[in-house]
Image (spheres, rainbow, N blue to C red):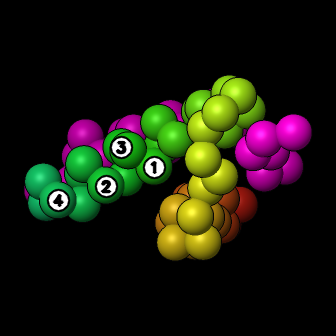
Amino acid sequence: MGNKRPDIDVNAIVAQMNKFASNTKSDHLSVGVARIAQRLQQANVMYQPPLTASELRIINMFTKQKAA
């Protein structure tokens, strides 16, 4: 039930997203990435809305970045 996490190392991706958010010079981008990282951490929490397609696209950018 609820929102399943993607099959990735969530903690590593969240750490990478938070590092990016803290290092970027754009406040708007920083806040957006940090919020998505927080939503990814809470993906298995009951009653959380599912991750949107745009959120999943951004998360996917960080998963590809880690593999490269």
Residue flagged by tag 2: what amino acid is it? Gly
- Image point (52%, 41%), residue name: 39
Q: Quadrant of residue 2?
A: top right
Residue 54, horizontal then vertical, whole percent: 52, 72
Q: Secondary structure at mark 4?
A: helix
- The span picked out in magenta is 1-25
Work out whether 9 lies above or below 50.
above
Marks 1 and 2 sit apart, C-alpha to C-alpha, by: 6 Å
Marks 4 and 1 sit apart, C-alpha to C-alpha, by: 13 Å
- Image point (61%, 55%), residue name: 51
Q: Does residue 55 appear to the left or right of 24 in the view shown?
A: right
| Cβ atoms at labels 4 and 2 below 8 Å apart | yes
Residue 19 colored in magenta in the image = yes
Disc 2 marks which residue? Answer: 32
Inspect this view and state whether residue 20 appears. no
Residue 33, horizontal then vertical, whole percent: 37, 52
| Cβ atoms at labels 1 and 2 below 8 Å apart | yes
Residue 4, horizontal then vertical, whole percent: 80, 45
Disc 3 marks which residue? Answer: 34
Question: Which residue sits furthest front?
Answer: 47
| Cβ atoms at labels 2 and 3 below 8 Å apart | yes
Residue 63, horizontal then vertical, whole percent: 65, 59
Disc 1 marks which residue? Answer: 36
Work out whether 38 lies above or below 23.
above
Question: In the rendered image, which quarter contains the N terminus?
Answer: top right
- Image point (45%, 49%), residue name: 36
Q: Secondary structure at mark 3?
A: helix
Disc 4 marks which residue? Answer: 28
Residue flagged by tag 3: what amino acid is it? Ala
| Cβ atoms at labels 3 and 1 below 8 Å apart | yes
Residue flagged by tag 1: what amino acid is it? Ile
